[in-house]
Amino acid sequence: MINSTTKLTCLLGSPVKQSLSPIIHNYLFRKYNINNIYTCFDVENIESAIKSIKTLNILGCNITIPHKVNVIDYLDFIDDNALLIGAVNTIKNEDNILKGYNTDGEGFVKSISDKGYLLKSKKVLVIGAGGASRSICVSLAKEGVHSIKIINRTISKAENLCETINSNFNTECSFSNKDILCKDLEEADIIINTTSIGMDSDLCPINTDIRVDKNLLVCDIVYKPHETTFIKWAKDNNLNVIYGIDMLINQAFESFFIWTGIKPDESDFLYIKSIYRN
Ligand code: NAP
């Protein structure tokens, strides 16, 4: 029950009305008996929104588009992972010190490892070089993947991300802005769509006429629709798939852990996934 000691956590961004985070976090706060609520604020001025975290003694926040990068300027501490990525999606207010983290990549890695797949020494093809891709590539490199090939429309962003990976990890990173060919898929163990292609549309980041006859794990981080054209293409080729909703839930669980020290379990994951699919 909400009372005078209820604390607040929230999402800051614009737009936020499509967010699933309130469903996930309010379920977790109730389940783990924590007197906290989660809500969303559509904010344009991130600087004043961040100041209010201290004023109102808010426990923590998630940050979404378009503030994930510029929010860094207004925090007291940024953890190494978020610094390398150059973006923050989670803030914890610890005794009026605002600490910034990025849980996207860890959430993605968990969505793969929880299904029993190993990342170490794998060859990964990543489509996209935006914010989510940066977070995912850093986490993949930390897991010791053999190589990452980044394909992105804007070559400079792919090049910049590659430089971050090559100068901080042993993983070999290369980049291109060419369309994906059969040969690229033959060389890869895992392919990940990190672009927004397929979000609320039936577009696909690769040519769906390409046929694949090998073991390839196909991951889409787009979660709306649940089954994107990319995932449908993978299933038509009898390939194993990981859905975007898995990363979405797991990155939220990582944020919840940062705020509360509690790690949600598999039953929480399955429950939230079932609500989403219904
Ligand atoms: P972002 O920073 O804006 O990056 C967007 C990426 O998509 C860039 O690589 C961009 O290429 C590419 N792109 C967009 N439209 C394109 C088009 N028409 N043709 C070719 N490439 C195109 O966004 P983000 O934060 O990384 O998010 C990307 C997607 O991931 C969104 O759909 C978001 O909802 C989803 N996401 C999911 C989760 C999850 O938990 N499942 C978490 C974060 C994000 P350019 O560099 O050439 O512009």
Image (cartoon, grey):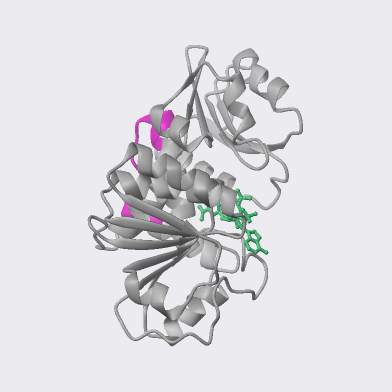
Q: Residue 260 lies in magenta, yes or no? A: yes
State left or right for residue 250 relative to residue 52: left
At a point 39% along the width and 60% down the height, the residue shown is: 270
Question: Along the line of sight, which residue is nearer the eye, 209 or 156?
Answer: 156
Q: Can see residue 24?
A: no
Q: Quadrant of the N terminus?
A: top right
Query: How many dots with numbers?
Result: 0
State left or right for residue 177 relative to residue 218: right
State left or right for residue 22 relative to residue 211: right
At a point 49% along the width and 29% down the height, the residue shown is: 35
Q: Quadrant of the C terminus?
A: bottom right
x, y percent for residue 228? 56, 73
Q: Quadrant of residue 138?
A: top left
x, y percent for residue 95? 47, 12
At a point 42% along the width and 26% down the height, the residue shown is: 79
State left or right for residue 134 relative to residue 12: left
In the image, residue 276 sits, relative to residue 108, either above or below, namely below
x, y percent for residue 128? 54, 57
Question: Ligand 1 falls in which quarter?
Answer: bottom right
In the image, residue 199 sits, relative to residue 215, either above or below, namely above
Question: Along the line of sight, which residue is nearer the eye, 247 or 121?
Answer: 121
By secondary structure, the bulk of the magenta-drawn segment is best described as helix
Give the magenta-colored segment's residue range: 257-269
In the image, residue 7 sits, relative to residue 38, either above or below, namely above
Q: Can see residue 187?
A: yes
Q: Residue 161 lies in magenta, yes or no? A: no
